[in-house]
Structure formats: structure tokens, C-alpha cells
Image: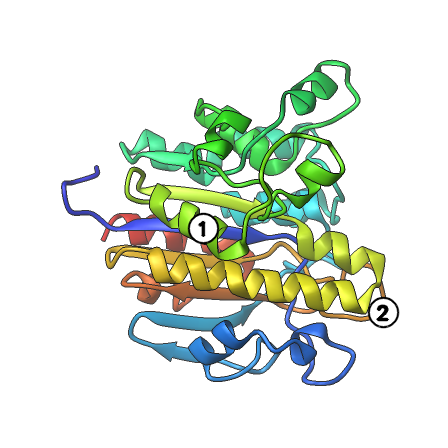
Amino acid sequence: MSSLVSSSVIFVFLDGLGLGPADDTNPLWLAPMPNLRRLLAGPLVAGRNVDRPGLLFKAIDALLGVQGLPQSATGQTALFTGVNAAQLLGQHLGAYPNARLIEVINQHNILKRATERGYRATFANAYTPLYFQLVRKRKRRHSATTLCVLAAGLPFRTLADLERGEAIYWDITNFYLAEHLHVAVPIIEPETAGQCLARLSRSYDLVLYESFLPDAVGHRKDREKALQVLDLLDRFFAGLLEEVGPTTTVVVSSDHGNLEEFPVGVHSTNPVPLLAVGPGAESLRQAQAITDVANGIMQVLEM
């Protein structure tokens, strides 16, 4: 159960971000990313391992013992539940969870596990009314994160929450909302979005946030856009880590690789990053695969 002084976790899920080689095919090698490079004393590439009090950075497996390219439905289910979803299905499943994976998410997802143990949990992402209209018309299906929120019985954050600084859109700055969906919201700096996410952890024990910018840009095979997104992410984490409190651990991971392999444009077999910053980093030290992340986060909450 939560206490007056408790450990909290901000779990940042970055779709489609793997750890590739230290060469010019890898935007993560090319991008300056000064804030994260300063934190880790080097770039986010395969083969690097940082393990010291309050800081962990390592590569973890996303293949899960199943042949083929890792995909979103099974990867995200594994990441959020700790269940080897690819092994359960005998294959990697793309895009949206099927009925069997939905059952796993409904029973084992981390938001539900946290709330059932008395912790205050929330999903930081803002939703538009259009999203739910499309779902009702069966033109849109729920992703794993949305299914986690539904299974935990938690409310969805709205555009009103976004305008109050109490939610973050998946693209971090609201650019997609303003320019593509023509929603009248201000475009914000990535540092501001990071600070907003950090402040949510003052009211919640577990805050989950999702951005699929890396995967979207990886599929586009646009190197300059990839470098822009990595700069945006670096600034976002600078704001987050500057604002976060001393009892909060920030955990970052992914479901599969993509952005780090240019110009392939499809998911990769590379490992994905596990970054933990804060007092609970030690609880994730033994993680070897994306199936270990959810249990590690629960251990942080129980510190």
C-alpha cells in the first residue's frame, strides 16, 4: 500500500526504439542528444552498460525466444504484463492485441496490478473525442496501453487536462494535434512536456506515458526527421529529470527496435533499452528481457 512517503515510478514507453551499432546507419549514434549523453557518459547504442547507484542503462531482449521480427501487440503486452505474449501465441503479432492477448492484459497489466495493491496509478496520455468516436464506429482499435487503462478502471485524460498541464499528447509537443487534427491547443516545448509528466508523479505512485514517435519516424526512413525526433526526446527527458522528485524513479523502455536501423524502415531484431534513473534503479538490475520490466517496476513501488 502507498504511504505518506513512498517510492513512485514514471514509466515512459517509447515505441520502436532499439539499440543499434555505433555507426552512421544508426540515428542514435549520429544524434547529439547532449542531455542523455551527459547522463550516461556516452551514446545510446548497443554494447553500453551503465550500472551505478540511482542509474541503470542496459540492453534487454525483445525477441522473447520466438523467430521473426518483434511486433507491437505481443511486445507491448509482454512489456506491460510480464507475460511472454509472443511465446503464448507462437508468433510475434503486429499492431493491436487479439482476443487472447486482451485476456492477458485484462488480468496482468501493470496499471491494474498497481491499483489492486492500493497504489494510485494513471495513464498520462491525453485522448481526443475523435478517438472514441472512431472506436465506436469500429474505425479504430484499442492499443495495449488503452486496454491497460480500461482493465484497471482508470479515467482517460482529456484535452481539458492537456490544457491544464495535467496530460501529455503522444507526440510530446502537441504539434500533431494542432497541425493535423486542427485542435486549438498550444504547441509546447518538449522540456515543458517533461516537466508536466514529472509533476503528475506528485499525485500518483505509478504514471505511464506512451510516445510512438520513434516507431512512426523509423517507418518513414527519413534520417533528418529521425534526428529531429531524437533531439525532441532528449529535451523532453531533460525537462522530466530536472523536475522529478527525489523519491521518483523514471523507467524508460520499448517494445521493439526500428528507429535505430536506417534506412530499413521495418522493425529490427535489436535489443531495446532499459533506462532507470532514481532510487529504484537497483530493482531493475536483473532484467534481461522486456518481460522483466513490469515486475521490476512493481518492486520499485514496494520499496
- Residue 146, compared with residue 63, is above or below; it is above
Amino acid at circle 1:
Phe
Q: Which of 268 and 226 is in front in this view?
A: 226
Question: Which dot marks residue 263?
Answer: 2
**Could you tell me which residue is drawn at 78 percent across and 68 percent down?**
224
**What colour scheme does the image use?**
rainbow
- Residue 261, compared with residue 50, is above or below; it is above
Quarter of the image where one finds residue 110: top left
**Could you tell me which residue is drawn at 53 percent across and 77 percent down?**
34
Are there few (<14), some (14-19), or many (20+) residues within 10 Å of tag 2? some
- Helix, strand or loop for disc 2: loop
- Helix, strand or loop for disc 1: strand
Q: Nearer the viewer, residue 252 or 272?
A: 252
> CB of mark 1 within 8 Å of CB of mark 2?
no
Real-space Cα separation, disc 1 to disc 2, in angstroms: 29 Å
Task: Give x and y (percent) for residue 27.
Answer: 71, 73
Task: Give x and y (percent) for residue 190.
Answer: 54, 55
Task: Give x and y (percent) for residue 168.
Answer: 52, 41
User: Is residue 58 shown left or right of residue 225?
Assistant: left
Task: Give x and y (percent) for residue 247.
Answer: 24, 55
Would you name the residue on which mark 1 appears?
11
**Could you tell me which residue is drawn at 52 percent across and 83 percent down?**
42
User: Is residue 138 shown left or right of residue 238?
Assistant: right
**Could you tell me which residue is drawn at 37 percent across and 65 percent down?**
277
Q: Residue furthest left?
A: 4
Question: Which dot marks residue 220?
Answer: none
- Residue 57, compared with residue 166, is above or below; it is below
Q: Tell me if residue 172 can be seen.
A: yes
Q: Which residue lies furthest to the top in this view?
A: 136
Quarter of the image where one finds residue 222: bottom right
Amino acid at circle 2:
Pro
Q: Tell me if residue 287 can be seen.
A: no
